[in-house]
Amino acid sequence: MTYLANALSLLIQFAFGCAVALFVFRLLAEAVRADFYNPICQFLYRATNPILTPIRRVIPTWRRINLAALLIAWLLEVIKNLLLRFTVPDFWASNWGTLLLGVADLLNFFMIVYLIMIVVWALLSYVNVDARNPLVPLLGKVVDPVLKPFRKLLPLIGGFDLSPVLAILVILLVQTIVVAWLMDLGHTI
């Protein structure tokens, strides 16, 4: 029976992870004012508009942060945790703990997304990539606000930008300290 529960848990995490990714990327694209005509942005807007349009009438955007998309992403994480609570035998959390686990999972998702994007951005800087590729300018716009403070701290050393290394270190520290603490707290409440 645990094999089926593990398979069901994997399917739940995958499905909800894809849905959360849509809303998180939509939120990030709007926050950095990404080019609306970018094909990736067009896909994100078309995929999320049917859900976000009615909610945005009630929950407005605040300082370029789409609060409706953030709320939907958090609710998806909470629903995922509720489903896991009933399917995985070792998964335990109270109702309040499930809400807190939704926050922890969403924060962890943001950290993982930025970790991957920073690594990809750093690798792309060493490779000659076609600038017309829709991913390159979008990735640059999304990663730049995170790397900018670290670029002020670390000057170029021998022509190398070491700000991604420091940003990755901070992301891993946030995951290790803040996200892990929130997850422990969510499981104990």
Image: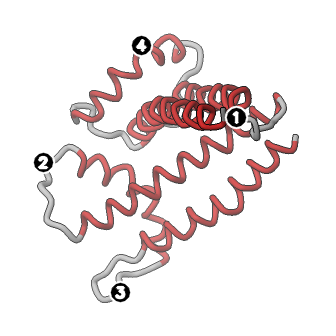
Q: Give the residue at x 64% y 60%.
A: 174
Who's the residue at 39% across and 44% down the image?
Answer: 32
Residue under label 3: 157
The reply to whether discs 3 and 1 touch (Cβ–Cβ < 8 Å) is no
Find residue 116 and report its horizontal and vertical position in percent: 42, 56
Circle 1 SS class: loop
**Of residues 66 and 183, which is closer to you in this image?**
183
Question: Which is nearer the eye, 83 or 59?
Answer: 83
Mark 2 or 1 closer to N-term? 1
**Is disc 3 placed on a helix, strand or loop?**
loop
Q: Residues within 10 Å of mark 2 (few under 14, many from 20)?
A: few
Residue kind at label 2, given as amino acid type: Arg
Q: Nearer the viewer, mark 1 or mark 4?
A: 1
Work out how far the residue at label 3 is from the one at label 4, CA to CA, in angstroms: 47 Å
**In the image, what residue type sits under mark 4?**
Pro
- Image quadrant in which you'd find residue 162: bottom left
Classify residue 161 as left or right of residue 101. Answer: left
95 shown above or below 28: above
What residue do we see at 49% from left, 67% from top?
167
Q: Nearer the viewer, mark 3 or mark 4?
A: 4
Is disc 2 placed on a helix, strand or loop? Answer: loop
Q: Which mark is residue 88?
A: 1
Q: Earlier in the sequence, mark 2 or mark 4?
A: 4
Mark 3 and mark 1: span between their CA atoms? 49 Å
Pointer 1: residues within 10 angstroms few (<14), some, or many (20+)? some
Cα–Cα gap, marks 2 and 3: 29 Å
Q: Residues within 10 Å of mark 3 (few under 14, many from 20)?
A: few
Q: Quadrant of residue 88?
A: top right
Residue 50 is labelled as: 4
CA gap, disc 2 to disc 4?
29 Å
Along the polypeptide, which appears first: circle 3 or circle 1? 1
Mark on residue 131?
none
